Image: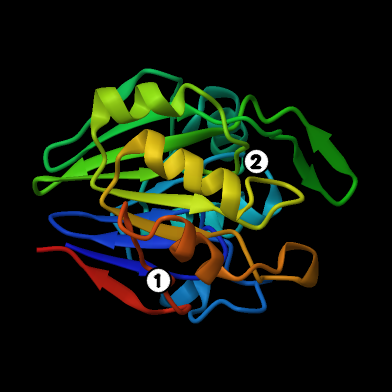
Amino acid sequence: MKITWLSHSAFLIEGSERILIDPFLSNNPLAPVKPEDVECDLICVTHGHGDHLGDAIPIGKRLGVPVVAIYELAQYISGRGAEAVGMNFGGTLKREKSSITMVPAVHSSGITETGFKVDGGLPGGFVIAMDGHTIYHAGDTALFSDMKLIGELHKPEVAMLPIGDLYTMNPYTASIAAEWLGAKTIIPMHYNTWPPIKQDPGDLRRMLEGKADVKALRPGEPLVLD
């Protein structure tokens, strides 16, 4: 399996299926690819903010693939002409080659367009199981104690955790989350896209030394799992 960081909170997970998460690409100053160059079988969106919903709708429409999101956001996506699958916390979407469980996040989730605002339901994260691997994408979130339960229930091997502060956890609180989750590998995300969320992922690496392997990927860099 290969996990490629597309900067910010966007990832492409490639195994028996290709799963694209939070594809904020076209207005992202660090994105290594354009929306029209991405190929996938499924898109997951953690919440309705523009830097996460991003290009999910045009990519979904171009490829004819479903966009998975919390129920209210899925209704919005469907109303914009893309195929959508709505789900909610604790539910699992079972596919032939993968399963996707939605878990909570502590954040906000309003959808904003020019001249249009609507509630986007609640923010979330995803636990993805595929090819014998379990991966947790936390979405935008603060530290919350139910991360311990996510670790106990799902035992993620890899966790993508935001560290940018201001809108999410910072490296210190992300280090606590990593210990609660028990993941062997941590990929920091949602940082350095713009000056207000500038962080040094080396801080997280130092805090987790001997406890977890912190992989601070460059935009476009893959991590290959055995």
Which residue: 43% across, 71% down? 216
In the picture, the disc for residue 38 is 1
Q: Looking at the picture, how far across and down is residue 101, in whole percent?
A: 33, 29
Q: SS for tag 2? A: loop
State the CA–CA distance, disc 2 to disc 1.
Answer: 20 Å
* Amino acid, disc 2: Gly
The residue mark sitting in front, 2 or 1, is 2
Measuring 19% from the left and 35% from the top, which residue is drawn there?
A: 95
Q: Residue at x 44, y 29 (%)?
A: 147
Q: Which mark is residue 160?
A: none
Secondary structure type for disc 1: loop
| Residue nearest the observer in this picture, 166 or 25 | 166
| Colour convention | rainbow
Crowding near the residue tagged with mark 1, few <14, some 14–19, many ≥20 C-alpha atoms within 10 Å = few
Residue 141 visible here: yes
Q: Find residue 48 and name its label.
A: 2
> Can residue 10 be seen at all in this image of the molecule?
no
- 189 to the left or right of 192: left
Residue 182 place in picture, x, y as percent = 30, 39
Toward the viewer: 147 or 81? 147
Q: Give the crowd class for mark 2: few <14, some 14-19, many >=20 residues within 10 Å.
A: many
Amino acid type, mark 1: Val
Residue 190: quadrant of the picture: bottom right
- Classify residue 63 as left or right of residue 114: left
Coordinates of residue 167 in the picture (x, y in percent): 73, 47
Horizontally, is 70 left or right of 117 in the view?
left
Q: Among all residues in the image, which is located at the extreme right?
A: 115
Q: Are marks 2 and 1 in contact (CB under 8 Å)?
A: no
Lateral position of residue 211 relative to residue 168, left or right: left
**Quadrant, the N terminus:** bottom left
